[in-house]
Image: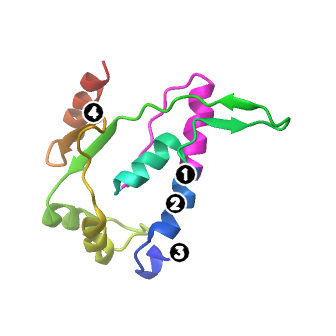
Amino acid sequence: MKMGKGIPLNDQDRIPWLCNLHDILQRDIASGQHVILACSALKKVYRDILIQGKDGAPLKCDESGKEEKLAEVKLLVVHLTGSFEVISGRLLKRKGHFMSPELLQSQFDTLEPPSAPENFIQISVDKNLSEIIATIMETLK
């Protein structure tokens, strides 16, 4: 709703959403699924929450109070890079999307690109979709 009104999100807005995504990743990985998640985890702390949860705790308590080990989330960050001009041009062509192009600068201002020791690859948005997918698939092998 905030973004729809042209108001950038802050950490307080994003962290509960990232925690929910972490829980979904945990559940799906524990059931043996391979998961692809697309989101703008703009800061390192956001990516850490996706991997470890809010408190970074590797254990959780079940209903009886016993601790159980959670499934490990192994995250490969696919960092799509592009100039402000290219991405802005694409946003202007979107119809009916909740994020207005006016918010793009706040996204660039917030962005902390991944760096070592994070597990990531960087791909230019100038590549076509099939090239981007091929690069990701090759990395996952």
- Residue identifier under label 4: 133
Q: State which quadrant residue 127 falls in.
A: top left
Residue at disc 2, secondary structure: helix
Callout count: 4
The x and y percentages for residue 50 are: 48, 45
Picture layout, residue 125 above or below residue 11? above
Tell me if 131 is positioned left or right of 2 in this view: left
Q: CA distance from mark 3 to mark 4?
A: 31 Å
Q: Nearer the viewer, mark 4 or mark 2?
A: 2
Mark 1 vs mark 4: which is more N-terminal? Answer: 1
Is-magenta flag for residue 112? no
Which kind of residue does numbered mark 2 sit on?
A: Ile
Determine whether, in the image, residue 126 is placed left or right of residue 59: left
Mark 1 vs 2: CB contact within 8 A? yes
| Amino acid type at image mark 3 | Met
Label 1, label 4: how far apart the Cα atoms are:
30 Å
Q: Nearer the viewer, residue 67 or 77?
A: 67
> Mark 3 sits on what residue?
1
Three-letter amino acid code of the residue under disc 1? Lys
Q: In the image, is residue 40 above or below residue 61? A: below
Q: Position of residue 119 (x, y in %)?
A: 30, 35
In this figure, which residue is indicated by the disc labeled 1?
54
Residue on which disc 2 sits: 15
Which stretch is magenta?
A: 20-41
Instruction: Tell which tag, 1 or 2, sits nearer the viewer.
Output: 1
Q: Secondary structure at mark 3?
A: loop
Q: Count neighbours of disc 3 (C-alpha within 10 A) and say few if under 14, some if 14 to 19, many if 20 or more.
A: few
User: In the rendered view, does 126 fall on the left or right side of 24?
Assistant: left
Q: CA distance from mark 1 to mark 3?
A: 23 Å
Please report whichever mark, 3 or 2, sits nearer to the chain's N-terminal start.
3
